[in-house]
């Protein structure tokens, strides 16, 4: 009788092969389904090293400065700013964009609110907070002024930068830094 060679590494069984294939199919399907959900919760990495970002509209398209500057002086435009925060940009009396933008998040409970040109105020509809044109509190319950950002225009592109200086309304270090 011939001597058979011992099998040190037996071949994979049919059951192990089917378990492996089933696991691979389940893992592929789960990762394909979870990728869009995970992508939704991750902040886009579009900012530069200095934290600046291009102002965008509600659909995520860059807004040219000429589009906003075509509006009358004193108009306020709502754009998506840093981290997608709604940010108001104002057209100054000289016809250029103001270098200071105001983030549209109430410091009471984080509601977004409209600019009221009739009263020349930001008015939060949630609990009645009112802010002056520069974002300082006129009436509570909001405890703090609105967050500021720096705005620069370069070649028809609107850049929004984090505020790094003292708050011009209080003369102190801003609460959001």
Image: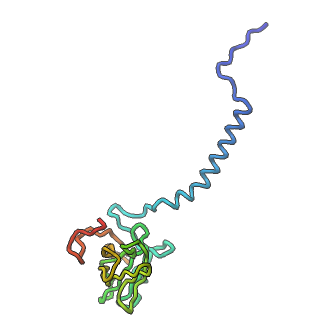
Question: Can you tell which quarter of the image residue 67 is in?
Answer: bottom left
Q: Residue at x 43, y 73 (%)?
A: 80
Residue positioned most to the right: 1
Q: Nearer the viewer, residue 124 or 165?
A: 124
Q: Who is closer to the viewer here, 55 or 126?
A: 126
Name the residue: 39% across, 64% down.
47
Which of the pair 158/41 is nearer the observer? Answer: 41
Percent x, y of residue 74: 35, 89
**Can residue 151 be seen in the rendering of this structure?**
no
Where 72 sits versus 109, above or below?
A: below
Q: Position of residue 109 (x, y in %)?
A: 40, 72
**Picture quarter with the C terminus:** bottom left
- Observer-nearest of 146 and 42: 146
The quadrant in which residue 73 appears is bottom left
Which color scheme is applied? rainbow
Q: How many marks?
A: 0
Q: Which residue ends up furthest to the bottom in the rendered image?
A: 118
**Quadrant of the rendered image containing residue 9:** top right
Looking at the rendering, in which quadrant would you find the N terminus?
A: top right
Q: Residue 8 vs residue 63: left or right?
A: right
Looking at this view, name the residue that lies furthest to the left.
171
Q: Is residue 20 above or below residue 101?
A: above
Whether residue 161 is visible to the viewer of this picture, yes or no, is: yes
Residue 170 picture location, percent across and down:
22, 75
Residue at 49% over, 75% down: 58
Q: Residue at x 37, y 83 (%)?
A: 122
């Amino acid at each position: 009788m011939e001597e058979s060679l011992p099998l040190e590494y037996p071949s994979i069984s049919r059951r192990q092969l089917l378990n492996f294939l089933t696991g691979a199919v389940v893992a592929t399907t789960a990762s394909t389904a979870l990728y869009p959900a995970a992508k939704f919760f991750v902040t886009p990495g579009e900012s530069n090293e200095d934290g600046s970002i291009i102002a965008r509209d509600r659909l995520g398209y860059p807004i040219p400065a000429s589009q906003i500057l075509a509006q009358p002086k004193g108009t306020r435009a709502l754009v998506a700013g840093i981290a997608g925060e709604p940010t108001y940009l104002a057209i100054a009396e000289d016809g250029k964009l103001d270098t200071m933008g105001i983030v549209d998040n109430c410091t009471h409970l984080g509601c977004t609110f409209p600019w009221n040109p009739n009263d020349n105020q930001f008015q939060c509809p949630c609990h009645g907070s009112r802010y002056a044109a520069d974002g300082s509190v006129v009436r509570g319950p909001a405890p703090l002024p609105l967050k500021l950002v720096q705005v620069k225009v370069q070649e028809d592109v609107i850049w929004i930068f984090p505020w790094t200086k003292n708050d011009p309304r209080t003369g102190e270090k801003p609460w959001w830094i």
